[in-house]
Amino acid sequence: MTERPSHLVAGLIAKRAELAGVIAELERQLAQHRADLTHIDGVLRVLAKDLDPETIKPKRIYRRSRYFARNELSRLCLAALRIADTKPLSIDDLATQAMTAKGFDAADAILRASVRGQVGSIVKRLHREGIIGNIGAGRASKWKLADGLPIPRSP
């Protein structure tokens, strides 16, 4: 006489089947995207003989934040830096001010870590664009509006 699988085993079997289905679908999509890329590369080689399609850098896919609207966090960071005037702020300070402005619980460690990571990306981009400057290095780095530039205003 064979034993019936327990609920735990049945649940794991169902989850495995689901994940295997997701993987199969993603592999199908990947194969289609590779075929599309091959066709585009072929057309580029015909139309632009001096261009090597392999030298074209892949474009990073924008992932939308669940917590902030598009460019909202950038605006919040710039507003905090404007209010601070010449006092440099850390990424932690900027994250705290952004969370407070949105009415989020600043004690939520998981949300705080997520916002801190997003703020880190934003200040790096703003620094690259010359909008803000930094003092220090690493985690001790502090940020302020760049000297000699007009103060950016929120739209």
Image: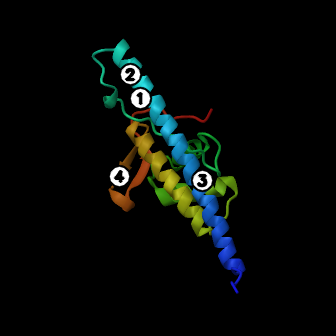
What's the amino acid at mark 1?
A: Thr
Where does label 3 land, which residue? 22
What's the amino acid at mark 4?
A: Ile
Where does label 4 land, which residue? 135
How dense is the environment of label 1, judged by Cα within 10 Å: few (below 14), some, or many (20 and up)? Answer: few
Find the distance from the CA under tag 1 to the CA under tag 2.
6 Å
Where does the image place residue 88, in percent across and percent down from the top left? 44, 52
> On the picture, is 59 further left or further right than 48?
right
What's the amino acid at mark 2?
A: Gly
Q: Is residue 77 visible?
A: no
Identify the disc placed on residue 38: 1
Q: State yes or no: discs 4 and 1 in contact (Cβ < 8 Å).
A: no
Q: Could you tell me which residue is drawn at 30 percent across and 24 percent down? A: 52
Where does label 2 land, which residue? 42
How dense is the environment of label 3, judged by Cα within 10 Å: few (below 14), some, or many (20 and up)? Answer: few
Which is nearer the N-term, disc 4 or disc 1? 1
Q: State yes or no: discs 3 and 2 in contact (Cβ < 8 Å).
A: no
Find the distance from the CA under tag 4 to the CA under tag 1.
46 Å
Q: Is residue 27 visible?
A: yes
What's the amino acid at mark 3?
A: Val
Q: Nearer the viewer, residue 7 or 77?
A: 7
Q: Secondary structure at mark 4?
A: strand
Please, is residue 133 above or below residue 13 in the view? above
Where does the image place residue 121, in percent across and percent down from the top left? 46, 48
Badge nearest the viewer, 3 or 4: 3
Which is nearer the N-term, disc 4 or disc 2? 2
Find the distance from the CA under tag 4 to the CA under tag 2.
48 Å
